[in-house]
Amino acid sequence: KRLILVGPPGSGKGTQSPIIKDEYCLCHLATGDMLRAAVAAKTPLGIKAKEAMEKGELVSDDLVVGIIDEAMKKPSCQKGFILDGFPRTVVQAEKLDQMLEKQGIKVDKVLNFAIDDSILEERITGRWIHPSSGRSYHTKFAPPKVPGVDDVTGEPLIQRKDDTAAVLKSRLEAFHKQTEPVIDYYTKKGIVANLHAEKPPKDVTAEVEKVLSS
Ligand code: AP5
Ligand code: ZN
């Protein structure tokens, strides 16, 4: 399957992605994870992206379209993919369509993680991540077995620099202004499935499975 996950910060995209990936053997491309890795490694891409990310603003369309274009060439992405956090502007959505058109393929479904803004601050400020895998935990909703330690590798967990209440405000503003039009773009194509992203993780997984098996 070829899937797009869209939703505000903290809506659960990164939490559901690995489950979908394992079940449907897809390639998982998360532009946020790729950008954070580039920032940590201080690559030219990371240096260009850092400032916008720390302010909670979007990185330029050209930069992210470039990384997706490159990453989609991987053999594991030929049969299907999950795009998490891309496209986030209508320009990015149009670029993606052009990219796929060249290969004669189309997006199958857009999973819209619909959720009220008021729930997101608690999710964002309680999140801890394992940077190299992108796995996320939550002090209250999904605690690791040992506090501050990744369940799988035993490596330390960190908090994202943009996971503060203040930066969340900018990220939400960017979502409403720039990303909600992307949902309208795909709604017109008739491929959006709306999820109840405020429910517990297991319930959201069940909704995702229902959509993907239909
Ligand atoms: P990105 O990394 O994509 O961040 P985001 O969209 O803000 O989304 P998050 O990762 O914060 O949320 P999520 O939905 O994955 O939540 P999660 O599952 O972890 O982007 C970061 C930045 O990179 C952007 O601001 C921008 O600068 C740049 N960028 C990236 N892509 C770009 C693009 N295409 N164009 C331009 N710029 C781009 O869950 C959150 C927490 O809640 C976790 O602790 C989790 O355990 C918990 N949780 C999850 N689900 C539930 C549930 N159902 N119930 C209770 N708790 C839950
Ligand atoms: Zn995420």
Image: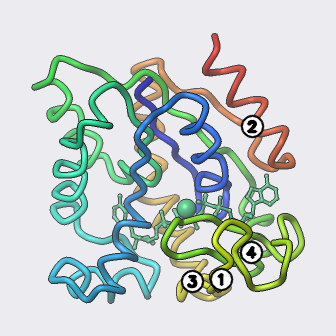
**Farthest left residue in view:** 102
Q: Nearer the viewer, mark 3 or mark 4?
A: 3
- Please, what is the three-letter code of the amino acid marked with disc 1? Leu
| Residue placed most toward the observer, 72 or 163 | 72
Query: CA gap, disc 2 to disc 1?
Result: 24 Å
- From the image, tell me which residue sits under label 1: 157
Query: CA gap, disc 3 to disc 4?
Result: 14 Å
Q: Give the quadrant of the N terminus.
A: top left
Name the secondary structure under disc 4. helix
Are discs 2 and 1 less than 8 Å apart at CB? no
Q: Is residue 57 above or below residue 3?
A: below
Are discs 1 and 3 less than 8 Å apart at CB? no
- From the image, tell me which residue sits under label 2: 205
Q: Position of residue 12 (x, y in %)?
A: 67, 54
Q: Residues within 10 Å of mark 3 (few under 14, many from 20)?
A: some
- From the image, tell me which residue sits under label 4: 121
| Residue placed most toward the observer, 181 or 70 | 70
- Please, what is the three-letter code of the amino acid marked with disc 3? Arg
Residue 146 lies left or right of residue 2; in this view the side is right
Query: CA gap, disc 2 to disc 4?
Result: 22 Å
Question: Which mark sits nearer the N-terminus, 2 or 4?
Answer: 4
Q: Residues within 10 Å of mark 4 (few under 14, many from 20)?
A: some
- From the image, tell me which residue sits under label 3: 160
Q: Nearer the viewer, mark 1 or mark 3?
A: 1
